[in-house]
Every structure is written in C-alpha cells, then in structure tokens.
Amino acid sequence: MVISPSFATPPSSYPPQAISQAESQTLEQQGRSLYDAGRFTEAIAVLQQAIQAYQQQGDAVQQAIALSNLALTYHQLGNWTQANEANRTMRQP
C-alpha cells in the first residue's frame, strides 16, 4: 500500500492570511476602478476586503478612506442605510 502525501486545507475557522499593505492598496484601487466603471456591486465586495485588511493592519486612516469610498458606492446604488452605516463606522474611534 502506497500512501501519498495529502495537503489538507485548513478549516474555515482559521483566520484568513494577512494581506500586505501593498495588496490592501491594490484592492482599494481596484474598488475605485470598479466604481468608476459603474460596477458598483463588484466595487462593494472589493472595498469590503480592503477595509477588513486595513483593520487587521491597524491602519485607521486608510480604513476610513476605504469606508468613505464604500459609502459613496452604496449611495450610487441608493442603499442609504448601508451608506450611513459605512459613514458611522468611519467616524468611530
């Protein structure tokens, strides 16, 4: 009997891999490009990833900028509740 090595995937309860500052900035830029192209739903998903990454990095300034962009994106879709929530989150210390 031959046993081949198996590569186990970590369970989903493991924390996500840390994203570098450069990757976070790339995500944010990608979100802005999607916004400019009118692809608002896609922009929201990418901006949320950037926000989470900035939060993990402890970069409150970049997180606030990304939250502001997220609020503008929700505004474009007429999602006032989510836009206001993003603005409130941005203002929290």
Image: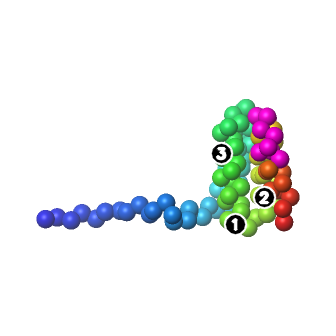
| Residue 30, image x, y percentages | 68, 44
Residue 79 part of the magenta-drawn span: yes
What element does badge 2 sit on?
helix
* Whether residue 90 is situated above or below residue 74 in the rendered picture: below
Please state which amino acid type lies under the numbered disc 1.
Gln
What element does badge 3 sit on?
helix
| CB atoms of marks 3 and 2 within 8 Å | no
Q: Please state, as top left, top right, bottom left or bottom right, where the C terminus lies in the image.
A: bottom right
Q: CA distance from mark 2 to mark 1?
A: 10 Å
What element does badge 1 sit on?
helix
Residue 30 part of the magenta-drawn span: no
Q: Earlier in the sequence, mark 2 or mark 1?
A: 1
- Residue at numbered disc 2: 62
Please state which amino acid type lies under the numbered disc 2.
Gln
- Residue 90 occupies which quadrant of the picture? bottom right
Q: Earlier in the sequence, mark 3 or mark 2?
A: 3
**Crowdedness near tag 1: few (<14), some (14–19) or many (≥20) residues, C-alpha within 10 Å:** some
Question: What span is in magenta?
Answer: 76-84
- Residue at numbered disc 3: 45
Counting every numbered tag in the picture gives: 3
Q: Residue furthest front?
A: 81
Q: Residue at x 83, y 47 (%)?
A: 84
- Residue at numbered disc 1: 57
Q: Residue furthest left?
A: 1
Evaluate whether residue 39 shows in this view: yes
Q: Residue at x 21, y 65 (%)?
A: 3
| Residue 20, image x, y percentages | 64, 62
| CB atoms of marks 2 and 1 within 8 Å | yes
